[in-house]
Image (cartoon, rainbow, N blue to C red):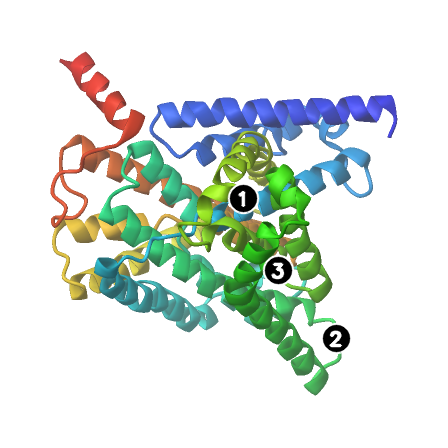
Amino acid sequence: MSTEALGSLALALLLLLAGANLLGQVAVRLRQPRVVGEILAGVLLGPSLLGLLAPGAAAAIFGSGGEDASTVVLGFLYQLGLLLLMFVSGAGVRNVLTRENRKPTAWMLGLGTALPFLVALGVAPLLPLHRFMGEAGNRPAVVLVFAIAAAVTSIPVITKIFHDLGILHTRFAGLMLGVAVLEDIVLWGFLAVATALASATGGAPGAGLAGRVALHVGTNVLYVALAMTVLPLLLRRLSRARWNVLASGSPIAWLMVVFLGYVCVAAVLDVTLAFAAFLAGFGLVGGVSNSEEPRFRAAFDALSRVSSAVFIPVYFALVGYRLDFTRGFSVVMLVAFLVGSTAVVLVSVGLAAHVSGFRGLDIVNLALTHNARGGPGIVLASVALDAGIISPPFFTTLVLTAVLTSQACGAWLDFVLRRGWPLLASEGPVQRSGQAASGVAAAQVERR
């Protein structure tokens, strides 16, 4: 890489990193999810604005596509940010399925998730799916992605919202995270099926194609099963082995070695890499017992802070960069999918919450939070676009739906807490923890 090319790449990273973090902080100050500002930074630097006003400068900074050095490196950082996002999310999966939440979790998973998924599967044949279809040209894969997008819930975004509002310690947060954890595991399995169908499209027809799909899906299922059961136990033994100098002397390096190992094995087996990264986090930190967690918690927190400040914001900025509102964007598609999927989710989760014994405001809080698509919605769109399953207009629709539903969730929960209303009637008024509570008290004094 020449000095000029390296300078252009450094400038691109500077703009993406600074823009994502600055606008992310602005979004937080406006009581919006940070991801909204990070994506907006990419939109401003992408073809929707900078590329439209100064296409030559945009190409010189961010690359012109193909084998251009900046394009290749930014593509790698995009994938790395995605994998680290899923890795961090997987590590957050722990101790959420308490006894009091098991019944409502089962109902919300069985109705609140399954019903939107099944409704989307039933409605899909009535839609002009050719407008949603990507280069792979596989209709069943598009239908699966459409159904997943209608049902998915965001673990990273609702966790961040709960943290910012100081309510992670509540039963409400534990219930929602428990549902999201189980739901995302199931839905990522369906995404593995969709990518298998897309990747097998070019194969031999008939039984040959069916065999390739069956092999791919079987490999994914086996990988997931081992990663959820056997590998966490194996990693626990390896991390405590005396000869393992990485785990004892450089735990951050050990975390990265395991993370990259999961991804490498998944690549060889043609397993969805994003889900492999999620399972790596689960196996290392998320799935361990309480006695094991402190061993790697400090190292993981350090890695998480760097990822959350650098690589993940750059990923979301590049997601925004890929949104092109000047070509192929359909307002009708966005409004129809956003309104239709939201209505089905709210009704389904409301029904599940009612059957579980919740009433009134409890149902509203649970339904609006469950509808936040956030990170997984964006990851789903990214993986499906890269696999050639969906078209760029549908990619834009899925990303904007994820952003708008997350905004609605954060704004509503903040409103409820400021009014002094309970998130769940059984908990009573919420006592916010940490800086969130201090910030609310300061704001109340200022208003007085």
Residue picked out by circle 3: 272
Gap between marks 3 and 2 measured at Cα: 19 Å
Work out whether mark 2 precedes mark 1 in sequence or the reverse, and give the earlier one: 1
Q: Residue at x 14, y 62 (%)?
A: 357
Contact between labelled residues 2 and 3, with CB atoms less than 8 Å apart:
no
Q: Is residue 360 left or right of residue 90?
A: left
Gap between marks 2 and 1 measured at Cα: 32 Å
Residue picked out by circle 2: 203
- Compared to 186, does 10 lie above or below? above
Q: Is residue 395 left or right of residue 215?
A: left
Q: Residue at x 43, y 52 (%)?
A: 93
Q: Residue at x 40, y 61 (%)?
A: 183
Work out whether mark 3 precedes mark 2 in sequence or the reverse, and give the earlier one: 2
In the rendered image, the quadrant that contains the N terminus is top right
In the rendered image, the quadrant that contains the C terminus is top left
Residue type highlighted by circle 2? Gly
Give x and y (percent) for residue 189. Answer: 52, 66
Of marks 3 and 2, the one in the foreground: 3
Specify the farthest residue to the right.
2
